[in-house]
Image (spheres, rainbow, N blue to C red):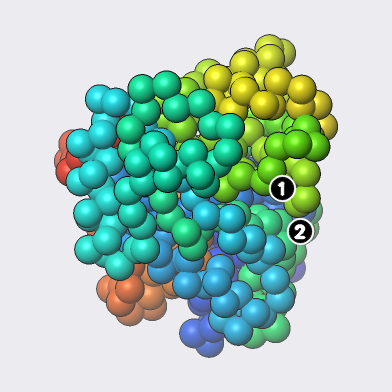
Amino acid sequence: MVDVADAIVIGAGVHGASVAFHLAERGLRPVVLERSTAASGATGRSSGLVRMHYDVEADARLALGSYHYFRSWAERVGGDAGFVRTGFLQLVPQEELEALRANVAMLNRVGIVTELLDARQLAELVPGIALDGFTLAAWEPDSGYADPTTTTTSLLAAAVAAGARLVQNAPVTAVRTEGGRVIGVDTPRGSWDAAIVIDAAGAWAGRVAAMVGLELPIVVWRHDVAYVRRPDDVPAHPAMIDFANAFYIRPEGANLTLIGLEDGNELADDPDRPVDAAAPGFVERAAERLCIRLPAFATAGLQSAHSGQDGITPDQHPIIGPAGPEGFYLDCGFSGTGFKISPAVGRGLAELILDGETTGADLHPYRFERFAEQDPVRGEHPYAPVWR
Ligand SMILES: Cc1cc2nc3c(=O)[nH]c(=O)nc-3n(C[C@H](O)[C@H](O)[C@H](O)COP(=O)(O)OP(=O)(O)OC[C@H]3O[C@@H](n4cnc5c(N)ncnc54)[C@H](O)[C@@H]3O)c2cc1C
């Protein structure tokens, strides 16, 4: 039996959910096909940081556009995204201070509320922080974190309320084409016909694109995180990325801290590897790194650790827009930082599909062709690549 939809979204992670929501809001009736369950990929394992500090202006604009959603989720989408405003600190090594200054100026120009803090201000904000040689940080008072799973499920619920369908446990096994354009997809649970097919399959996106003969420059990026219980005398801290020590943290609830590392993130080909456990040695490395910057965590206790996988591209930026047969769109390659920009990306892609152009977001930098054109996404004042 063949069903018919206005558009087919492959993958019910936060990006599939967002583009489905925005298409449904514009009056389409898309179907979202998910191989497992909603948010079972990178999204459900994401650290959920919502910050706007970037060294690429287009990224910052997507983050700001998305922040407007997170800040007023119930009115804009409905339901809850679990957004918690903690403030966000960006720390960089001494050799990147000039880039930090320039990027804060760029972010201010874009309309993001952010300022530079000196060591004294930083010590007031984060008591006990070890500052050895450290002079400046960027501070974003409005940022924080959100819950990626509820973000996704509320987008899906709103999409369904507007006419979309969600079919879980339905892996797409083939994308059908005819005369150079997509016409539908097959799953073990049935086939769907549509003139629009969106590849939002996260770490599996390369496999889906191969179904239409497209080779994507995407590999599988693996990332471990741990939750630690803060010692009673350590107060809650803001969300923070510390490039100098290659880690990030954010609080979780009343007394947990989540930590992830920017180095040692394994690259591989297999998106199906088990991700329930963090890699051996990760917790020890994370604890050591955390205690360099916040020595009072020496008596913190491990709560849990897990892993997750996303698709990563050579310039660590997503691929968004048409590619391959007519009607086929890429919405993937989010390279470990895609959660926070998902609302604006979904809106922009829906506009690109329906109107051929975007109003808020500039998605041109993320086009598939940039790899062949050797025009990678890169900031004017770039920091060293994050996932080393
Ligand atoms: C541990 C971890 C921490 C992170 N922390 C942050 C953070 O703090 N902030 C941030 O902004 N980003 C973060 N990220 C990145 C962010 O979570 C991802 O970029 C984002 O969730 C990707 O969403 P997605 O919808 O593209 O992919 P996914 O969430 O992986 O969704 C893709 C979906 O497609 C489905 N699928 C695959 N193949 C098929 C098929 N053939 N048919 C049907 N369905 C299919 C999968 O089952 C999956 O559910 C983190 C990622 C990880 C792994």
Give residue 159's position: percent from left, percent from top: 64, 77
Q: Label 1 belongs to which residue?
A: 252
SS assignment at label 1: strand
- Which amino acid is tagged 1? Glu
Q: Is residue 387 above or below residue 38?
A: above
Rendered-image quadrant of the C terminus: top left
Give residue 74's position: percent from left, percent from top: 65, 79
Q: Label 2 belongs to which residue?
A: 168
Rendered-image quadrant of the N terminus: bottom right
Of marks 1 and 2, the one in the foreground? 1
Q: In the depicted view, which residue is nearer to us: 374 or 206?
A: 374
Q: In the depicted view, which residue is nearer to us: 105 or 17?
A: 105
First-in-chain label (1 vs 2): 2
Whether residue 263 sits left or right of residue 111 in the image: it is right
- Which amino acid is tagged 2? Gln
Give residue 67's position: percent from left, percent from top: 48, 66
